[in-house]
Image (spheres, rainbow, N blue to C red):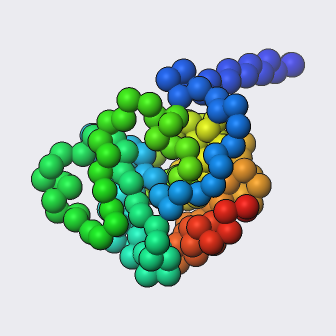
Amino acid sequence: LPISVFISPFPIPSDVGIAQSLPDKFDGRFIFLGAQEHAPNREALLWLLKDIWPKIAAKEPSVRLEIIGRWDEHFQKSVRLDRVSFAGFVDDLGKALRGGTMLVPLKVGSGIRTKLLASFAQGVPAISTTVGAEGLLARDGQEILLCDEPEQFATAAVQLAQDPER
């Protein structure tokens, strides 16, 4: 019996849109996008701050981490680190992403990663875990860098910071 296959493309979020040109250059910001209410985001951010960010910051002292999304004041105070800031909700996500590099250290989750679709639509490079990029047709080393270990993730981030053309 023939099998019918249906494809339902997931659109770029309409409030982000598609950039007409690539960002001019890396502005020194690594970006984590996600809200505290979603447990996989909490786990990912804590892993990033504990095991990955210190390695990036030690190797590349000129960079900073910007966390976009709603995080309560108690959480923000509990993870206070040098060169890490919380931007909260931003009115223009596309503009907020441009010039940065997206970090998606998700360890669990399901569904399509709209944070990566938004990043791709704005021409923003992204580093993700394999789980973080599930559901997308992005290829490691082509449209995205996939890293599942803290040292590997940090090394990829530093390499992108030092080689903006990449």
Residue found 34% across the figure and 71% down from its top: 50
In x, y percent, where is residue 165?
73, 61
Q: Quadrant of residue 91?
A: top left
In this rendering, does residue 156 appear at all?
no
Residue found 86% across the figure and 19% down from its top: 2
In the rendered structure, the answer to whether residue 83 lies left or right of residue 8 reads left
- Note whether 145 is above or below 92 in the view shown: below
In x, y percent, where is residue 83?
34, 66
The extreme front residue here reads 24
In the rendered structure, the answer to whether residue 51 lies left or right of residue 131 reads left
Residue found 69% across the figure and 43% down from its top: 22
Q: Quadrant of the N terminus?
A: top right
In x, y percent, where is residue 141?
74, 60
The answer to which of 99 and 38 lies nearer the viewer is 99
In x, y percent, where is residue 76?
20, 55
The answer to which of 155 and 92 lies nearer the viewer is 92
- Note whether 27 is above or below 62 in the view shown: above
The extreme left residue here reads 74
Q: Quadrant of the C terminus?
A: bottom right
> How many numbered callouts?
0
Residue found 39% across the figure and 54% down from its top: 66
The answer to which of 110 and 76 lies nearer the viewer is 76
- Note whether 3 is above or below 53 in the view shown: above
The extreme bottom residue here reads 58
